[in-house]
Amino acid sequence: MTELKNKELMLAPLAGVTDVAFRIICEKYGADKTFTEMASVNAMVYDNRQTDEILFISEKEKHANVQIFGRDPEKIEMAIKDKINPLENITDLSFNMGCPAPKIFKNGEGSALMKEPDLVDKITKTLVKSTNKKINVKFRSGVDESLKNYIEIGKICEDNGVDYVILHGRTREQHYSGIANWDDIKKLKEALTIPVIANGDVFTVDDFKNIIEKTNADGVMLARGAMGNPFLFKYIKEYLETGDYTPITPSEIIDQIREQYDLSLEFKDQRLVVNQMRKHVGWYIKGLPDSSKVRDEVNKLKTKEEIFDLLDEYKNVLEG
């Protein structure tokens, strides 16, 4: 049986999800590393204000790191030296070669880079020479089933001094559909000597156990499995310590939503927080009694006070 302990648990960079407040909460429940939403090196070079907000890390965070994307080695080097190296509170820099979004792919960035191994070679050399921070590269199994070159990309990363890689066991063509191919992660782990982090379809403690036993990966990165469920970090850590875990109660879920609202308001305008938290509330309460009704009501409310009143009523119903 594969040893489960001493495996790193990471929070994936998720656009519109892994902001400061959510990263703090995931840390609280046991995330060993978290990552910002991915930031464009092009925008970083031109001092884009929105990108500076993405890169912001709070003093309350102890394990936060940054993910960037791009395709121009010169701009990548400039962005790292000007924006990343001065960030003394981060230890790791992640480079994205896995994003399947049409706009990113069309620009030849994200997962489109897997079509250009020579450029991957240049980029990874640039990453390593530009910083003393730990470098990881996150990529997919390939662009599609006809171009599954994840082992080639992994070996380029290893040869050029990348510290560890993260493999999402889907092709770009799959986006987030179908089933993640954990066999690909296993094969990559067997092919490399640097650490390999597994990513894809980990929604439960059993999923964590199974992906480690299947792949022998050095850690797991939680993505959609953490949305509305930062408690999964706690469940996994408890299981590793005791062989069991205690599920969060419905009323504790509501308390956690309130905490995330309050944390978000420390860093963002109330109107923006109310808009962004609507989706988080939906994720948090999914599967609870009358959750769809409550979600619809939350989507109509416009202030923190209205939302908290509704959540308090819902908590009383759940406890009753």
Image (cartoon, rainbow, N blue to C red):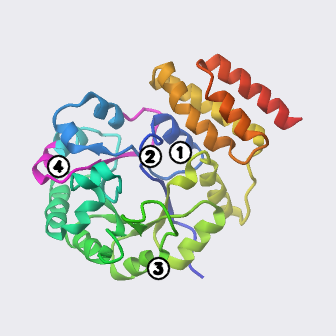
Residue 259, percent from left and from top: 62, 31
The total of numbered circles placed on residues is 4
The span picked out in magenta is 56-78
The 10 Å Cα crowd at callout 4, few under 14, some 14 to 19, many 20 or more, is many
Horizontal side of residue 167 vs 304, given as left or right: left
Mark 1 closeness class: few <14, some 14–19, many ≥20 residues within 10 Å = many
| SS for callout 1 | helix
Is residue 58 in the magenta section?
Answer: yes
Estimate the x, y position of residue 139 in percent, counting from the top left: 34, 63
CB-based contact (under 8 Å), mark 2 and mark 1: yes
Q: Which residue is mark 2?
A: 63
Residue placed under numbered mark 3 in the picture = 183
Q: Which mark is residue 27?
A: 1
Between marks 3 and 1, how big is the CA–CA gap? 29 Å
- Tell me the distance, in whole angstroms, between the alpha carbons under discs 3 and 2: 29 Å
Q: Earlier in the sequence, mark 3 or mark 2?
A: 2
Secondary element type, mark 4? helix
Camera-nearest residue between 123 and 29: 123
Q: Is residue 135 visible?
A: no
SS at mark 3 in the image: helix
Question: Of the residues tagged 1 and 4, which is closer to the observer?
Answer: 4
**What's the mark number on residue 76?**
4
Q: Which mark is first along the chain, 1 or 2? A: 1
First in sequence: mark 3 vs mark 1: 1
Amino acid carrying label 3: it is: Asp
| Labelled disc at residue 313 | none
Labels 1 and 4: the sequence-earlier one? 1
Q: Determine the residue positioned at 76% across, 26% down.
A: 312
Mark 2 or mark 4, which is nearer the start of the sequence?
Answer: 2
